[in-house]
Image (cartoon, rainbow, N blue to C red):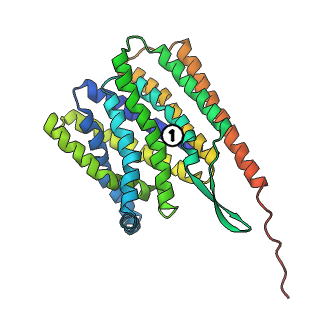
Amino acid sequence: MKEMMIGILASMFFAVTFILNRSMELGGGSWLWSSSLRFLFMVPFLFLIVLFRRNLKQVIEELAKKPLPWLGWSFVGFVLFYAPITYAAAYGPGWLVAGTWQLTIVAGVLVGPLFFTTIQTKDGPVKQRHRLPVRGLLVSLLIFAGVILIQLDQAEGITFHMLMAGVLPVLVAAFAYPLGNRKMMEVCGGRLDTFQRVFGMTVASLPFWLLLSVVGLIQVGPPSQSQLLQTFIVAISSGVIATTLFFIATDRVRQHHGRLAAVEATQSTQVIFVMVGEILLLATPLPSGTAIAGLLIIMGGMLLHSFYSQKVTAKQKTELPPPPARTRHS
């Protein structure tokens, strides 16, 4: 339950991304700068954090040891996650992008069988593929149904082109984020803490963000002062605070597939935070009964995820073999 609370807190800071990305697009800013500047701003802050904690050398050693996996999975987990989201912000309001992003709840469950857990047997360590948690998938689909109700409540005036351009890129991001995150946990093997891993992934993805910056400079020119300020806020709120909190939560439950899916499901609360933020900052109307029903379904699904993950954890503890009896030496 503690990990889920951390995940919900991360979602609150993540919500800033959807609100400000839409604000920047409405203000004439390019998605190329909205995406690349966030990660460029993140580098010095993460560098100082890792340097202050005196574990920078270990990050450099891990990057040098496996450069290709770091480049590849950082590209999947960061670039294929954030560039499509900022692109989609140009074609749809924040609630549409944030709502579609909740497919990552289902994606987090579906990518589970791509990973293995090492278990100890009488014949030695054996790799066992993660099973697809059917109950967890059903609960995730329930949460996503609540998100769809919110979308239906606010879907008036959305064209087919806006739907495709604002939804399809987010579908790519929804699968890329949990896949890249979990693969990097696998590559790190518990040798790096959360700050080190986020910093390492940010550094490994820098070539792609610098390339996007060059393209942005050629196509639209330099970013405005307003976009610089807003991307700076997104970098701190979403890039540093939210990402670190979310990775802390997933790191703590990485050995428990059901609990990991439950933590990833906390991202559904982003829709609530985005809706509240748009009401307060953009003066959007209050949600109707349909949207409120969707919110209740989301919260109910979150409670079911929490109950199920705790039940699975309790079952795993009861199935553990008893510790060896202590013998008294004379």
x 36%, y 66%: residue: 64
SS for callout 1:
helix
- Residue 236 in sight: no
Circle 1 residue: 9
The image shows residue 252 at horizontal and vertical percentages of 57, 53
Residue farthest to the front, as pictured: 123
From the viewer's perspective, tell me whether residue 58 is left or right of residue 136.
Answer: left
Q: Is residue 27 visible?
A: yes
Q: Which of the image's four quarters has the C terminus?
A: bottom right
- x, y (%) of residue 5? 57, 41
Specify whether 42 is left or right of 288. Answer: left
Image position of 272 (left or right of 313): left
Asked if residue 284 is positioned above or below residue 74 in the image, the reply reads above
On the rendered structure, is 155 left or right of 306?
left
Disc 1 residue type (three-letter) = Leu
Q: Residues within 10 Å of mark 1 (few under 14, many from 20)?
A: some
Q: Position of residue 166 (x, y in %)?
A: 37, 25
Which of 108 and 86 lies nearest the eye of the viewer?
A: 108
| Image quadrant containing the N terminus | top right
Q: Position of residue 110 (x, y in %)?
A: 56, 39
